[in-house]
Image (cartoon, rainbow, N blue to C red):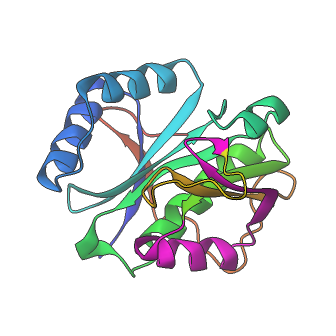
Amino acid sequence: MNVKVERLLTPVGMSAWKEAFALQQIPRPDEYYELCLAENAAGERVTLFACADGRILGAAHLKYRSDYPPFGKQGIPEINDLNVFPEYRRRGIANLLIGELERAAGDRHEVIGIGVGLYADYGAAQRLYSRRGYIPDGRGVMYANRPVVPGSQVSVDDDLVLYLTKRLSAGGAELNGTGRTKGSGHLGGAPHE
């Protein structure tokens, strides 16, 4: 399978993404897709798709202004909402998307962040982030972006997160053996630079 990375830049790309997520039963409100498109156009976010044979296999975002307060205050961009569809997992697609987002962040930032869930469904992501050099940010576990204090009770769900950071090399990510995409572009128009 020849996987390439494409960037969200047009309403056509947004529609293809929305349809792919609907087929995978990944619920997102219409406003989410519209916000992502607008933030991409404004340079506040980078949304990338892994694609092959005209199909979206997964997606991920780089938010230049993180909703996680410590990242937001320090100007640390955050990789966010990384999804690779189940039938395409364990093929290096998440690694490919992360590498491209690290390169995008590395043009303007020295550090990048990411949050990871803590229950078993996130085990593969936890291992991947560790292999890529991400380490805990030192603030402990968060629930809905707020610290979990000792003795408190929270639900073990997607809002229970440990945030991680990675130092980037000048001009992009430390590649550690990861490859560049074989082609890049964006859905619905001219090639991505």
At horizontal 59% and vertical 24% (from top left) the residue drawn is 43
**Viewer-side residue, 44 vs 30:** 30
Indicate whether 162 appears above or below 6: below
Residue, x 12% and y 52% (percent of image)? 23
Count of numbered circles in the view:
0
Q: Residue furthest front?
A: 151
Which of the two residues, 22 or 53, is positioned nearer the viewer here?
Answer: 22
Estimate the x, y position of residue 8 in percent, counting from the top left: 40, 36
Q: Quadrant of residue 116?
A: bottom right
Position of residue 160 measured from the top left corner of the image (x, y, whole percent): 53, 55
Position of the N terminus by quadrant: bottom left
- Quarter residue 24 falls in: bottom left
Q: Using residue 35 as the reference point, say whether residue 168 is left or right of it.
A: right
Q: Which stretch appears magenta?
A: 118-146
* 11 versus 125 height, above or below: above
Who's the residue at 63% across and 70% down the image?
Answer: 129
> Where the C terminus falls, by quadrant?
top right
User: Going by the image, does 170 lie left or right of 22?
Assistant: right
Where's residue 19, x and y in %? Answer: 15, 42
Residue 122 magenta:
yes
Q: 60 and 55: which one is in front? A: 60
Depth order, front residue of 32/70: 70
> Is residue 86 found left or right of 183 in the rendered image?
left
Is 180 located above or below residue 1 in the figure?
Answer: above
> x and y percent of residue 56 in the render?
26, 55
Residue 24 against residue 63 in the figure, above or below: below
Let me know if residue 42 is in the magenta part. no
- Whether residue 167 is visible to the viewer of this picture, yes or no, is no
Q: In this view of the protein, can residue 6 be seen by the observer? A: yes
| Residue visible at 39% across and 82% down in the picture | 90
